[in-house]
């Protein structure tokens, strides 16, 4: 069985992979750099609270996914994908130019506009990249291609956030951040020129530009296909789950582990590498077949290691007057159990999400595939916002601790997972994977 890495030898895969990798890197690089700027300088200058500014930034980035995902799905079904991707990447260069002006001249209103536009740009690219894969890949390549995409996404998010931390510490940091963001946008634009043309799947589609009725109709269409509906709900749960853990990582690193900033990066790296490892193994574990057989193992792992994280954190009692580095923390008895829990949480997430993404692409009717992915993005955004509300409810309203939040999440995940898998099994026979949905390329 050929390795999925052989896909990098093909033009059908490599340009789109690097286009999406660079795009995810730039999204997270700019967003994290802006959060750091807001936290350490803008808040004081504007006289606003750090919490208000950071939550406003998060809202502005995610809002376009609610508003434009359904419209983005229509456009990706109607138009040829490589050309559409090129236009979107031109838009990214323009947005990053605005962002550079905003950073250098400290025009914070322009930075918030740029952040909203960057979220919109990502919204329009999302249905293209995931609808592109089944159109460009053979059916026996789809799981491997999704594994590589998920790996690339996880690592690009992590590296983008780390790079933002490094660049914002440099002298003349606003110039460095601006230059880096523009450079990555230009590299992404260059990568699009090598993406092969893919015929439009529904060129006669009449686009409905009313974003509210379009969103309603798209979700209604998804609901009419029960198997795809529950696949999308399963996908969105992954983003709820991941956001719940990743958002709390800085706080439990500092409060419970007594760790400094390097510990935060180390823990995020463990989680991201775990996701990447699990994602890459999906091809071998499923023998190249689109199936749900790994999903229950992913669900079990997500619950098991979340519950164990509760016990491993609860058993720690670190008293230190100064924040510890990674090496110092690693010498603390019980810390390696925490490290292992975070890695295997990511690993379980990888073997859970890749089969669901591959199934969503494979089972979607080719004429509506991008719109199904647009609906998926709407639900992803809803679930991510819900994760923040859930964490506030557990921590602030019920006054539970961070380890208890992880325990509750693990238990809820088990209940949710049992329901999800039962629905997937129930409806798996109601839809068939059509051979015409995939390329016949050699």
Image (cartoon, helix red, strand yellow):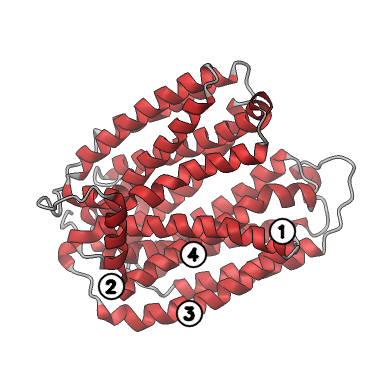
Say above or below: 440 vs 230. Answer: above
**Label 4 with label 2: CB-CB less than 8 Å:** no
Residue 419 is tagged as 3
Instruction: Tell me what residue is drawn at x 42 percent, y 24 percent.
Output: 98
Helix, strand or loop status at disc 3? helix
* Left or right: 380 in relation to 330: left
What SS does tag 2 mark? loop
Q: CA distance from mark 1 to mark 2?
A: 38 Å
Q: Is residue 369 left or right of residue 19?
A: left
> Which badge, 1 or 2, comes first in the chain's sequence?
2
1 or 2: mark nearer the eye: 1
Q: Is residue 173 above or below residue 151?
A: above
Earlier residue among tags 3 and 4 = 4
Residues packed near mark 4 inside 10 Å, few (<14), some (14 to 19) or many (20 plus): many
Separation of marks 1 and 3 at Cα, in angstroms: 28 Å
Q: Which residue is mark 1?
A: 396
Q: Residues within 10 Å of mark 1 (few under 14, many from 20)?
A: few
Q: Secondary structure at mark 4?
A: helix
Quadrant in the picture for the C terminus: bottom left
Task: Measuring from the top left, give residue 240's x and y in whole percent.
Answer: 53, 60
For label 4, the residue is 237
Q: Is residue 390 left or right of residue 338?
A: left
Disc 4 versus disc 1: distance between alpha carbons?
22 Å
Helix, strand or loop under label 1: helix
Badge 3, how many Cα within 10 Å: few under 14, some, many 20+? few
Q: Residue at x 89, y 50 (%)?
A: 319
Residue 384 location (% of width, % of height): 51, 56
């Amino acid at each position: 069985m050929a390795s999925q890495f052989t896909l990098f030898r093909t033009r059908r895969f490599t340009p789109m992979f690097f286009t999406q990798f660079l795009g995810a890197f730039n999204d997270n690089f700019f967003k994290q750099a802006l959060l750091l700027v807001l936290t350490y300088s803008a808040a004081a200058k504007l006289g606003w609270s750090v919490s208000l500014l950071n939550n406003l930034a998060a809202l502005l980035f995610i809002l376009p996914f609610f508003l434009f995902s359904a419209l983005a799905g229509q456009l990706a079904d109607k138009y040829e994908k490589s050309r559409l991707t090129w236009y979107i990447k031109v838009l990214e260069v323009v947005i990053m130019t605005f962002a550079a002006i905003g950073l250098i001249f400290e025009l914070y209103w322009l930075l918030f506009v740029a952040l909203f536009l960057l979220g919109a740009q990502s919204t329009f690219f999302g249905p293209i990249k995931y609808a592109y894969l089944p159109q460009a890949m053979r059916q026996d390549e789809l799981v491997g291609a999704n594994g590589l995409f998920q790996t690339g996404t996880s690592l690009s998010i992590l590296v983008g956030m780390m790079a933002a931390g490094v660049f914002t510490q440099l002298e003349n940091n606003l110039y460095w951040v601006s230059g880096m963001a523009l450079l990555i946008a230009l590299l992404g634009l260059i990568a699009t020129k090598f993406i092969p043309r893919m015929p439009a799947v529904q060129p006669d589609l009449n686009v409905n530009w009313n974003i509210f009725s379009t969103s309603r109709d798209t979700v209604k269409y998804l609901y009419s296909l029960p198997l795809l509906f529950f696949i999308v709900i399963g996908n969105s749960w992954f983003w709820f789950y991941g956001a719940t853990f990743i958002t709390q990582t800085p706080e439990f690193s500092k409060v419970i582990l007594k760790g400094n900033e390097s510990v935060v990066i180390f823990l995020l790296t463990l989680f991201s590498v775990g996701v990447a490892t699990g994602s890459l193994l999906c091809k071998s574990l499923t023998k190249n077949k689109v199936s749900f057989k790994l999903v229950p193992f992913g669900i079990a792992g997500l619950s098991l290691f979340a519950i164990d994280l509760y016990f491993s954190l609860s058993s720690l009692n670190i008293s230190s007057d100064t924040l510890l580095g990674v090496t110092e923390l690693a010498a603390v008895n019980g810390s390696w159990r925490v490290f292992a829990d975070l890695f295997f949480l990511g690993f379980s997430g990888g073997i859970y999400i890749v089969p669901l993404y591959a199934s969503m692409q494979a089972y979607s009717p080719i004429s509506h595939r991008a719109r199904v992915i647009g609906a998926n993005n709407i639900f992803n955004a809803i679930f991510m916002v819900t994760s923040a509300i859930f964490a506030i409810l557990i921590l602030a309203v019920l006054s539970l601790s961070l380890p208890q939040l992880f325990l509750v999440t693990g238990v809820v995940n088990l209940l949710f997972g049992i329901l999800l898998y039962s629905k997937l099994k129930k409806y798996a026979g109601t839809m068939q994977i059509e051979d015409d949905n995939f390329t016949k390329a050699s």
